Amino acid sequence: MAEHQLLISGVHYGANGDSVAGQKDTEEMLVRTRELLSRIDRTRPIVVLSPDPSNHIHRNAIQARALGQRIGRVSYDDNEKAWKLLHQTGKPMLLARVKDVFIVDHGYVDVIVDGDELQEPLQPSASEIEWRFWLSDLPLLPDSEQLQAQQEVAYVLDNVYLPHLSDVDMMELKTYLDIWLENSWHDLSREARQKRSDYIELLLAAQSKEVRQLAEPLKEQRRRLLEREPLDRLATMWWDARLGSPEVQYLWQQWRLKNENKLWLGLRRIDSLLRQMPGELYGDIGKPDVILSSLYYLNTPRKAFQSIMALLMLRELTCRELGITMHPMIEYEYDADGRITNPMEMPTTIGRVVAFAETQCDKTQKQTIQLLAQWLRDDYEQSHPKEIEALAETDPLVMINGDVNGDVIERGGSKNENSIGKGE
């Protein structure tokens, strides 16, 4: 018989039925969380683990209950192990006993499940979400210095130190692990979580007690990653720093240039993409802490995470430029300057110039001509509004109030475009 340790997190949700993800707990709620943790520590009840299909963010979640009350859920990093144990027993639930209780504001519980040895190595948990759209040609949040440092030291750890733990230089190993820890606290991607778990497993399997102890800071980071204090840092300090970084500002300037005088239309385009975020996250726009936390639990690949972050940051900068708050939009809220015409169908030479660029120019030249065509089109629209309106009544290729080449971006829906900032 083997002992399998699992971590139970989310206890504050079990203690507070009215707790809402992304909103700070009141002092009364924190007291209830500590009381529940204290009661578990004092009584050491039998803990029952069972699938939780009602969890709309984590479809494979396993809830933890004790004495008729939900007390939390199996942490993401132990979720696959819990499912494996369920499959091996062939039973609908697992019985666990309390090992340790950590009584803090967002505390957690370590439990032990007695059972047979796991019959085969655990495979990384697979997400049920289709990420293909977000891995396509979308704007990417540029790599930060932190991410580059994280990837650099990970390569050294993977190829120099971790394969030789039996005779490793402890000071050097600790130095690289500390650098990885310092630069990964903001990384909520699938790759970072898997790397963290891999490092913990390798270090704990070492013969040297001194080496095994190096896993403790990594375990602590994993446990605390989305507690209120680190989440606030992500949603304020990290978010604002990235918004103001030269890399994001350059991305914004390029986007701003391509959507000159048409920012409301640009906002509509961004939203048509963001409405496709999994977990109905579009409704949480304006709450970066909620979205960051959800993307972590959705096991988001790094490139998809960078695509979503790029669009969210472009959206916030667009909202600031327009003087509106960052909030979910419905169709009638988009301003009238989304009303433009297709330059190919304008009764001027603009259409012929754009058509020539499509076949005879390279990418840079074509983008320049498209941008000039947009400016000329805007001037034409302002000086010939009646002609534009008449053209819209007879030509389905004219774009007015969100209709693009005859395809309507419906309210609450989205038009699947592979990139933003394209010429019309």
Image (spheres, rainbow, N blue to C red):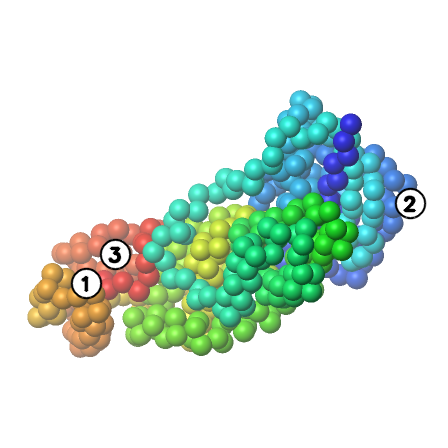
> Which residue is most to the top?
90
- Residue 21: image location, x then y, percent: 64, 54
Q: Is residue 48 above or below residue 145?
A: above
Q: CA distance from mark 2 to mark 3?
A: 64 Å
Q: Residue at x 69, y 65 (%)?
A: 171
Q: Quadrant of the C terminus?
A: bottom left
Pick whichever, 178 or 90, lies toward us.
178
Pick whichever, 329 or 206, lies toward us.
206
Q: Which mark is residue 141?
A: none
Q: Residue at x 60, y 34 (%)?
A: 121
**In-image side of 2 versus 160 (left or right):** right
Q: Which residue is mark 1?
A: 342
Pick whichever, 196 or 224, lies toward us.
196
What amino acid is labelled 1 in the image?
Answer: Asn
Q: Is residue 286 above or below residue 40?
A: below
- Residue 53: image location, x then y, percent: 61, 35
Q: CA distance from mark 3 to mark 1?
A: 8 Å
Q: Residues within 10 Å of mark 3 (few under 14, many from 20)?
A: some
What amino acid is labelled 2 in the image?
Answer: Arg
What amino acid is labelled 3 in the image?
Answer: Val
Determine the secondary structure under disc 3: strand
- Quarter-wise, where is residue 404 in the image? bottom left
- Judged by depth in the image, the label closer to the viewer, 2 or 1, is 2
Q: Which mark is residue 42?
A: 2
Q: Which mark is residue 404?
A: 3
Q: Is residue 384 above or below residue 160?
A: below
